[in-house]
């Protein structure tokens, strides 16, 4: 399936990254040499998207436009159109995705959470497009440890996994190890059909009092319209201080190679 548009929610308040995000929006925090949001746009472009709809809050939109558009387009992103859309109230991830509906219209679209960066050389969006069905949305999944089952949405399988693909019957937001219906978690990469928008419009606030994207995925599964692709590599979580540090090391090694590796060995004493 060819997918020409990507939606990137970037309106989160970044409470886990305070005090850094008191002034600088979370999506614009630097990871090595570029803001987290740029990694997401680059990933979407590599997967063939020509348009990136970035959902921002009232304070972030002009900064995103400045970063991507002032003084010409960034190298490698000349062919992708950046379109900010404002989420005026922090009503949840599901609501943020819903805000992109008028720009996406009736097209299938990638959805990427900027908190998660793919490791160098590991892209999952092409795999989602490869296993896609015109009538089904595809979720990227990972097997989670017990502690992570309280931090991520977890899917209800509807079939056995075959060649890393399975059908999904529903999903539960942050169930915890006792109530988790499986160990397969939603990790921030999706390929949605436009059917998700009317579902999100009717989705009531869930966990945390927010409109949860996981609840809309549950409804897709209930309708038989959800499929999962189980990735074999973790994404880099830059939404916490430790995760940001770890991601910077992984991406720094890719960028600076032996020079940075030698520095790390010196610091670690071997």
Image (tube, grey):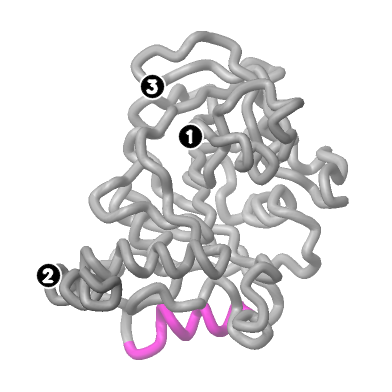
On the image, the x and y values in percent for residue 68 come to 41, 78
Q: Which mark is residue 164?
A: 3
Q: Along the polypeptide, which appears first: circle 1 or circle 2?
A: 1
Residue at image point 44% right, 78% down: 30
Q: Which residues are magenta?
A: 60-71
> Which label number is shown at residue 258?
2
Query: Which residue is located at x 74 percent, y 41 percent?
Result: 200
The residue nearer to you, when weighing 256 against 220, is 256
Label 3 or label 1, whichever lies nearer to me, is 1
Q: Which mark is residue 120?
A: none
Mark positioned earlier in the residue sequence (3 or 2): 3
Q: In the figure, residue 207 lies in which quadrant?
A: top right
Determine crowd level at label 3: few under 14, some 14-19, many 20+ residues with C-alpha closer than 10 A. Answer: few
Q: Residue furthest front?
A: 269
Give the CA separation, mark 3 to mark 2.
Answer: 34 Å
Q: Is residue 1 visible?
A: no
Mark count: 3
Query: For residue 23, what is the image quadrant?
Result: bottom right
Vertical position of residue 163 compared to residue 211: above or below: above
Q: Quadrant of the N terminus?
A: top left
Name the residue: 43% across, 75% down.
35
- Residue 128 pos. (x, y %): 40, 33
Q: Nearer the viewer, residue 132 or 248?
A: 248
């Amino acid at each position: 399936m060819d997918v020409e548009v990507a939606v990137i929610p970037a309106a989160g308040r970044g409470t886990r990254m305070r005090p850094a995000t008191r002034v600088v929006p979370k999506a614009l925090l630097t990871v090595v040499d570029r803001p987290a949001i740029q990694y997401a746009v680059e990933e979407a472009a590599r997967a063939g998207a020509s348009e990136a709809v970035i959902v921002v809050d009232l304070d972030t939109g002009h900064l995103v436009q400045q970063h991507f558009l002032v003084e010409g387009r960034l190298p490698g992103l000349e062919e992708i159109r950046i379109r900010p859309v404002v989420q005026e109230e922090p009503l949840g991830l599901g609501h943020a995705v819903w805000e992109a509906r008028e720009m996406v219209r009736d097209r299938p679209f990638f959805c990427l959470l900027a908190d998660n960066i793919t490791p160098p050389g590991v892209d999952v969006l092409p795999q989602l497009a490869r296993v896609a069905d015109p009538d089904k949305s595809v979720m990227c999944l990972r097997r989670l440890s017990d502690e992570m089952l309280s931090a991520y949405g977890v899917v209800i399988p509807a079939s056995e996994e075959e060649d890393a693909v399975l059908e999904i019957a529903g999903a539960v937001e942050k169930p915890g190890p006792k109530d988790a219906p499986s160990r397969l978690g939603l990790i921030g990469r999706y390929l949605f059909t436009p059917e998700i928008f009317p579902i999100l419009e009717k989705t009531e606030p869930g966990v945390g009092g927010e409109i949860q994207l996981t609840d809309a995925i549950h409804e897709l599964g209930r309708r038989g319209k959800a499929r999962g692709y189980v990735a074999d590599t973790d994404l880099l979580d830059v939404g916490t201080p430790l995760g940001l540090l770890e991601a910077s090391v992984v991406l720094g090694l890719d960028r600076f190679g032996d020079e940075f590796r030698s520095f790390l060995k010196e610091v670690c004493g071997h």
